[in-house]
Image: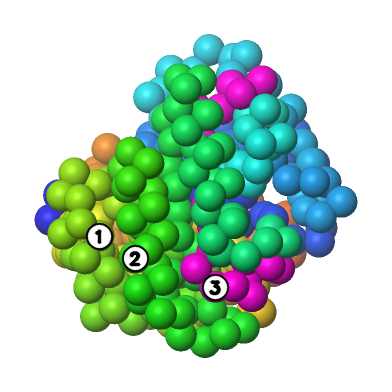
């Protein structure tokens, strides 16, 4: 198993459902510390209507302020784009990796985009190709790939049809998203293997939620099967506001701690990740789902972190 790329989605997926708005300057401080930690990809926000997701209203400003500064890091800045208008905004403010997705669940797709899965997939493919023409890296996802909070099981054939539509368009960076947290390790392993059988050169990302406590097990199943990247969130915060039961992601610092115990990804500054998770917990005034930011990592106490 090669060491995975870590895609931190806390500033977007972690914060999007929070009703308490985080001031832009505070977000910027968290983002800069995450950059300093040496993560591979950092998702700054999403380009959605501010009325629907008020927490993301400052995404354009955050990108402008981050890219205006000289960053001594190779971290790629990503954002979630839902439609053509969102892509225009992303291109205007310097997004490096454009993340787009459609849901394999008809109900979740309607809740999230106002259209069915097939129509949403066609629009996402067209928008992704436009992003590529503009010279941007692109990742496309199948949301609710492992099940849906509204519908329950999602047919595997439907998930693989969406994957095939992406591959047919020449899109090779594909995220399998467990939006509702219904996945189990055998299912995750099988889906990653099936996608790689369809296209051995595909770069697969696993986006895992921990709704039923199987998050970390599912992450390692994805990695064992050949996934290249994992999307995680500081403190395990997060959850899609348009699914039935929003629950957090696998915590970034928990995954990095586990990897480092086996000698992998020692290039990432775990103490920075822990510090951000502690600050986020303090800001919201509650305990987050993550473990390591509270227990401290083995061999390091919280005061040192």
Magenta residues, start to end? 91-112
- Reading the image, the residue beneath label 2 is 160
* Label 3 SS: loop
Between disc 2 and disc 1, the foreground one is 2
Instruction: Using the numbered discs, state the Cα–Cα distance from disc 1 to disc 3 in whole angstroms.
Output: 18 Å
Check residue 105 in the rendering and tell me which mark sits there, or answer none: 3
Query: Could you tell me if residue 2 is visible in this image?
Result: yes
Specify few, some or many for label 1: CA neighbours under 10 Å numbering under 14, 14-19, or 20 or more: many
Q: Distance of mark 2 from mark 1, alpha carbons?
A: 7 Å
User: Is tag 1's residue or tag 3's residue first in the polypeptide sequence?
Assistant: 3
Residue 195's disc is 1
Task: Report x, y in % for residue 63.
Answer: 64, 27
The answer to whether residue 241 of the structure is visible from this angle is: no
Q: Is residue 51 above or below residue 241?
A: above
Secondary structure state at the residue bearing disc 2? helix
Residue 157 drawn above or below residue 9: below
Q: Position of residue 160 (x, y in %)?
A: 34, 65
The alpha-carbon separation of the residues under discs 3 and 2 comes to 13 Å
Residue 96 in the image: state x and y as whole percent.
49, 27
Total of numbered circles in the picture?
A: 3
Task: Rate crowding at label 2 as few (under 14), some (14 to 19) or many (20 or more) other CA atoms within 10 Å.
Answer: some
């Amino acid at each position: 198993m090669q060491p995975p790329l870590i895609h931190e989605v806390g500033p977007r997926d972690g914060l999007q459902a929070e009703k308490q708005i985080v001031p832009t300057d505070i977000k910027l401080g968290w983002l800069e510390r995450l950059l300093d930690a040496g993560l591979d990809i950092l998702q700054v926000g999403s380009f959605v209507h501010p009325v629907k997701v008020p927490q993301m209203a400052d995404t354009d400003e955050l990108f402008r302020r981050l890219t205006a500064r000289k960053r001594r890091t190779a971290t790629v800045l990503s954002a979630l784009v839902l439609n053509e208008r969102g892509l225009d905004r992303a291109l205007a403010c310097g997004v490096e990796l454009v993340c787009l997705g459609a849901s394999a669940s008809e109900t979740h797709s309607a809740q999230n985009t106002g259209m069915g899965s097939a129509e949403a997939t066609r629009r996402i493919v067209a928008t992704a190709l436009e992003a590529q023409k503009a010279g941007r890296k692109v990742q496309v996802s199948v949301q609710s790939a492992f099940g849906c909070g509204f519908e329950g099981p999602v047919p595997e054939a439907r998930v693989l049809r969406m994957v095939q539509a992406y591959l047919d368009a020449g899109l090779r960076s594909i995220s399998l998203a467990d939006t509702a947290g219904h996945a189990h390790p055998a299912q995750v392993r099988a889906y990653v293997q099936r996608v790689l059988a369809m296209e051995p050169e595909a770069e697969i990302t696993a986006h895992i939620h921990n709704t039923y406590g199987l998050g970390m097990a599912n992450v390692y199943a994805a990695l064992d099967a050949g996934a290249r990247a994992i999307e995680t969130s500081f403190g395990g915060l997060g959850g899609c506001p348009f699914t039935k039961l929003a629950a957090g992601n696998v915590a970034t610092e928990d995954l990095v701690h586990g990897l480092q115990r086996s000698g992998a990804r020692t290039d990432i500054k775990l103490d920075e990740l822990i510090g951000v998770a502690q600050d986020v917990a303090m800001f919201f005034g509650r305990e987050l789902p993550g473990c390591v930011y509270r227990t401290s990592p083995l061999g390091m106490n919280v005061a040192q972190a």
